[in-house]
Amino acid sequence: MKSKLIVGNWKMNGGLQANSALLSAIQSGLSSVTCRAAVCVPSPYLAQMQTLLVGSSLAWGAQDVSAHESGAYTGEVSASMLRDFGVRYCLVGHSERRQYHAESDTLVATKAQRALSAGITPIVCVGETQAERAAGQTEAVVKRQLAAVIHANGHCISEIVVAYEPVWAIGTGLTASPEQAQVVHGLLRKQLQAATAQADRMAILYGGSMNAENAATLLAQPDVDGGLIGGAALKADDFLTILASASR
Ligand code: PEP
């Protein structure tokens, strides 16, 4: 059985002292964890992760990457810069970036490409809004978002991680039921199977108010290979409980 992957998304939270306290609390509970685990932190703290997590089983990642390799793109951070700080994963196309920064499917696909060419695993986020679900468009939306990434990344597609994050479940306390999550994960798996023979070993994470209470049932679904965790990743006990659920 493939090992599950749990990724914390700290979003724009933290500080040097708070990060250090959170990491040491998480690390003190890692000895019994057998799943793969990572935290995606604000870019200024990547150097701190590199110092504090060296040799740890907890990997670290970024929350975004530039679609450009280098040059006159003020404020952007390139994939090779992330690589300099030991980054293993990078979120791309998180709904907050699609919503607040107008990131298109094409831009997200290019970002995934940049990450892959720097040896970083992009965690490609897809998901429908409440209105899209109500209009029966869930399947069409997530397939369109993933298709752009498949199209741009060709045979490298098996190197990505996919995260299904229904927008209506992010930070709202509303969670997709395990059945709702499985339906969409099953669709995404089929789409990946049509693109690569490696689809069954790829990780499709669920994200959207996953917490210490609901993680085990979500993670028990056959196509839920892990979780992308926002709020609950900021509490060491909750994050460790989720890691324990994924280690069974
Ligand atoms: C997220 O930001 O990716 C997320 C899933 O957030 P939350 O767990 O807080 O809903």
Image (tube, helix red, strand yellow):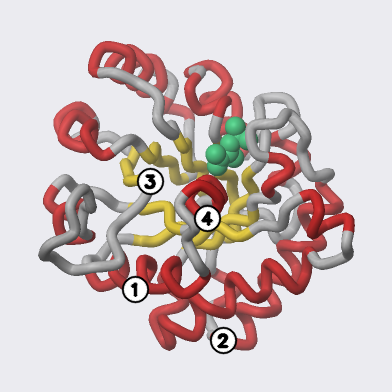
What amino acid is labelled 1 in the image?
A: Gln
* Residue that badge 1 annotates: 113
Whether 98 is drawn above or below 240: the answer is: below
Q: Nearer the viewer, residue 156 or 146?
A: 146
Rounded to the nearest whole Å, what is the CA distance between mark 4 and mark 3? 13 Å
Calculate the distance from the C-alpha at mark 2 to the C-alpha at mark 3.
26 Å
Circle 2 SS class: helix
> Which type of secondary structure does the marked residue at label 3 adopt?
loop
Most foreground residue, 66 or 179: 66
Q: Residue 57, how many percent across, how many down? A: 33, 38
Q: Is residue 10 left or right of residue 203?
A: left
Q: CA distance from mark 1 to mark 3?
A: 15 Å
Would you name the residue on which mark 4 appears? 98
Q: Is residue 34 left or right of residue 222?
A: left
Q: Earlier in the sequence, mark 4 or mark 2?
A: 4
The picture places residue 204, in percent across and down from the top left corner, at 59, 60
Amino acid type shown at disc 4: Arg
